[in-house]
Amino acid sequence: MTILLFLALLLAYACGMVLPLCFPGRPHIQNVIAHGSAAVAGGLGIVLGLVGLFASEPLVWFLPSSIPLLTFSLRLDSLSAFFVLTISLVGLAVSVFASGYVREFYGRIPVSLLGFLYNGFILSMLLVVTADNAFFFLIVWELMSLLSYFLVVSEHEKPDVRFAGLFYLIMTHVGTAFILMTFLMFYQETGSFAFESFRNADQSLPEGLRTLVFWTALIGFGTKAGIVPLHVWLPYAHPAAPSHVSALMSGVMIKTAIYGLLRMYFDFLGGPFPWWWGFVVLLVGTVSAVLGVMYALMEHDLKSLLAFHSVENIGIILMGIGTGMVFYAYDLPHLAALGIIAGLYHTLNHAVFKALLFMGAGSLLYATHTRNMEEYGGLLRRMPWTGLFFLIGAISISALPPTNGFVSEWLVFQGLFLSLELPSLFLKLMLPIAGALLALTGALALACFVKAFGISFLALPRSSHARKALEVPVPMRVGMGFLAGLCLVLGLGPAVVVPLLDRVSEPFVGISIAGRVFEMGGWTLAPVSGEFSSLSTPVLAIVLAGLTGLGWGLAYVLGGKGKTRFYKTWGCGLNVTARMEYTATGFVQPIKRVFSTIYQPTVKLETEFLEESHYFAKRRHFEFSIEPIFLKYLYHPILEFFSTLADRSRVIQGGNLSLYLAYIFGTLVFLLMVMG
Amino acid sequence: MPNLPINIGSYLVNLCSALLLLTCFAIVAQRRLMACVDLFALQSVFLAVTATLVAYLTGIHHIYLAAVLTIAIKAMILPRILKKIVRQLNVQREVSMYVNIPTGLLICGALVILAFFITEPIVHLGFLLTQDSLAIALAIVLIGFFIMVSRLKAVTQVIGFLVIENGLFLAATAAAYGMPLIVELGIFFDVLVAGLIVGIYTHQIQEAFGSVDTSRMKALKE
């Protein structure tokens, strides 16, 4: 039964890849087939994910190959099923959205090719999270990276897109190299590439090798996930891709790295590991969260801003998982389960709201043809649906109730504050500090999205682009609406979601906590006990709605009859124009000043005065930039080192034919003498 | 089995192989390009004789065909092409070399010793009548390589390449009584094509640099 489902899924993606190629020169038909198949496959994937989550035993499919060490084996356990579900949910929504969005590319980019890569990309992600053989895993991992690279460079006629693509390609291969090393270390110990043998090898690995595996896996998967300081490619690659692809890359592709880390640490290296592993993951997560949101604040390119927020949210996910690992190391399984569930919940939530926000950014791009926030403004009136959905996404990512982002961040907080139960004083101090930094992150994210929403959608249009903007086509609105609805559902229904996630964490920590985290008949979430903390989002939503209603009611009663008068905003007698509005740059000035140590800002103000008097400025030029610390102090030195090395080694490239022949000759004679 | 005693046949094969090696030394010692081409043709004739001897002694008939092709291609067609190139380019002598002739000959002697030293552990494991030729074949390959490295003119480098090919052919005959016919045919075709390509290539170098001195190609380096 499930195998049929899986085959149907493969068939749907294959159709989406191949069929559009049969209709050359008909972009609309290609578009409908490619994204229609992807949407159908997304629906099938959701079913498959749910089946996998509820199955009592992992589902295994196996296809031998003639290549030694490689078998095409797939395994759908609850962890894989959860990621299949996440990918498919987002894939479904994004496919619907894409069928509208891709119209923008008719005549510029071959839609059949775009559809081929798009379907292949989603399929490769699904195979990554289900592969059960290291060799096969690496093949599909590489396929995923390459297909996404080709999607990133869709608009390759632009030089900055080509640069972004190259940067992404290099970084992702650095990551793959580390993952390869990880698997080779396992192979050396077990003599097999099957994940099954890795699972059994956990105890036989020597201590030093286990530590090495921990680091290589963290670096390898961390590059894909975008942890600081390996995040530098994200703000280049994600904005360069077409928006529906950015939604997939930022929403789900970087999550495959979270899958990889969980698989590696809990499944393969399971068993007791030192507490500092969890602490390192937590530390990396905290740094990524804080720095990610800080750099996001300074971005005025909406898609780069969202890309930096992906760094932040990956950080939050890793904080949850890191907390879980710390508790696991101290043998507190129910708290470990809580940490993992928080991380997974945030994984799902981030996938949903980040895809939604990227689709919103794509809609703005579609309507205005610019990504610069300073050229938006007044779009809420022109694009009310997009505005509403973007607002829901913004509320979610800012972790405000009653949306999903709030629930998962609340769970992460619970994990961090429950560090009181840990025996180590160091961790008792450190985890609450991480909690404080997470609170800072949340506040800054809120500021960032007040900026993003306010500058883009409110006030007057700041450019002719924004003035002429029209609401986007229906499929795009449907795609966004689906995910916006999901944001609310996931926010209101932790009582449904948490038991599902519990099924994922149970095999790893060996304990189910679904039965004990709910009070009052499943309406309230209480991780430890009702006295410590409890959360009931439905009640919270009702209270919030009630308070809003009360506010309106009071305003109505006290403020008199609502008499609407349309008039210009009062501007002290001046005519109000768009140039008087608060700009995005202006909005973040206070934050830039407070954190100037981190930003290292450079501000340049040049004033040209009138010749008659120095009290009147003729023209002012304002420039503001922040120091790209990681690029400058980490990546450029490395780059320089390698270019110097390459320059030095050019000496052997004499350019002389006889010299090259002499190299070969010398090598031959040397080998003959040594071997002979 | 033919009526020659087996060890006499073996001596003859060794003699021909030695003559091949001798022509190699002659090429290394020769400055005039035309003479180099002639020596290469002579070497190819010796190779064909060796192959015929082996074919006769072992009764493997397809080696005859290989011998005929060697005469036709390596002793007649290729030398003709090379001589035409030399005439066209009007370059008669190799004036400068990386290694002067006496030193070159000494190095070649060292290479022969090396070849015998390397093959020594394998040779007495063999049971073919041609087994001693293996060391000579390897020596010819190494000397051919040395010619390619030490000479500057494209034409002599081509000759070096062809000498390597001869050495490999001898090695195949010596170690395994020749390769399957289809492989040999393929190799002959390759050599012919290589000769033609190299003809064009030398011409291009002449056009671009006004000389067939390959050391001038350094200018191609950025």
Image (cartoon, coloured by chain):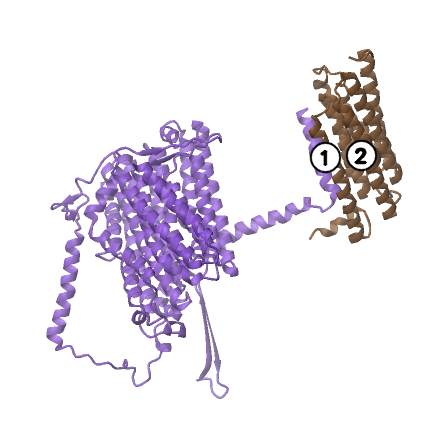
Chain under callout 2: B
Asked if residue A351 is positioned above or below residue A140 in the image, the reply reads below
Left or right, B175 with reference to A72: right
Q: Which chain is brown?
A: B
Which label sits on residue A334? none
Quadrant that contains the N terminus of chain A: top left
Q: Nearer the viewer, residue A45 or A218?
A: A45
Residue A208 in view, yes or no:
no
What percent of the width, then of the height, locates residue A98? 38, 57
Camera-near label (1 vs 2) is 2
Q: Nearer the viewer, residue A598 or A137?
A: A137
Which residue in the rendered view is the most extreme toward the bottom? A612
Q: Which residue is mark 1?
A: A665
Q: What crowding class fits label 2: few (fewer than 14 Cα within 10 Å), some (14-19), or many (20 or more)?
A: some
Q: Which residue is mark 2?
A: B73
Chain A: drawing colour: purple
Q: Nearer the viewer, residue A10 or B88?
A: A10
The amino acid marked with disc number 2 is Ile
**What residue is at 15 percent from the left and 48 percent from the top?**
A524
